[in-house]
Amino acid sequence: MDLRVELQKTLESVGPENIWRPVYDNEQVLLADGIGDTRDGRPQDISKVDFKGKTVLDLGCNFGYYSFLAKRLGAQKVVGIDKDARAIKGCKILKTMDNTKGVNFRTGDFTNSSISGTFDIVMLINFIGKIMVIEGIQRLLAAAERFSTQTMIISARPFYRISKHLGGDAESIIRHYTPAYINNGKLYLIEFIRHYFHDNWDMSVISPNHVCDSIKRTLLFVRK
């Protein structure tokens, strides 16, 4: 089967509601728009990080948008992981179509993954959403920290309104995050993440200070 046809069939099987970033073929023909907010994890913000010669792990890579970006920015080796085998199939087709070297993809739940070794840079971009916040994001953060030796790039919203965004179960949210990060009915997620990593990492915000608080900020963590 022609690779472009196979990729199109894979995109159709995943469905547009599960494709987060634009997907282009090797001739830069747009095959899927991606439904993610383009202000979350902008390439011009990610490019502020030095990828040259680095090893990179892209957690929840979807169709590999940030994996391929990291390679274009000079990474030596990139591994993308996602639990959707269809998305990973699409990543591998894109890799073959563009003859990209040094980028590999695998299927798995990275919070329970048997990935061995560590990486210079770990990315968790355009991944943390409402359902994950309701369930508690500690396992996601722990996985990112476990694999990273130098740098983490994480995107997250500044806060969520518990009644509007998180199902209104304030007691459950307090159990996950403690009252320290909850005020006026809001869970201040970035502050929670900052303090979660405080002992070992310095955090900076590398995306614009958007007026709209629903837009995720891109956070850069550098190991102390």
Image (cartoon, grey):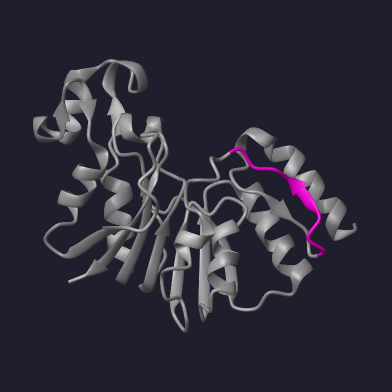
Residue at 60%, 58% in the rendered image: 64
Please identify the dominant SS of the magenta region: loop
Q: Quadrant of residue 98?
A: bottom right
Task: Tell me where residue 222 appears, x and y as whole percent.
Answer: 26, 68
Residue at 35%, 46% in the rendered image: 209
Taking 182 as reference, is 79 above or below it? below
Q: Is residue 179 left or right of residue 39?
A: left
Nearest the viewer among 11 and 110 is 11
Task: Tell me where residue 187 appears, x and y as whole percent.
Answer: 23, 30
Q: Which residues are magenta?
A: 27-35
Q: Is residue 183 left or right of residue 49?
A: left
Task: Tell me where residue 213 appears, x and y as whole percent.
Answer: 36, 34
Magenta segment includes 77: no
Quarter of the rendering occupied by the C terminus: bottom left
Taking 40 as reference, is 94 above or below it? below
Residue at 84%, 59% in the rendered image: 3
Quarter of the rendering occupied by the N terminus: bottom right
Q: Quadrant of residue 185?
A: top left
Taking 125 as reference, is 202 above or below it? below
Magenta segment includes 34: yes
Nearest the viewer among 88 and 63 is 63
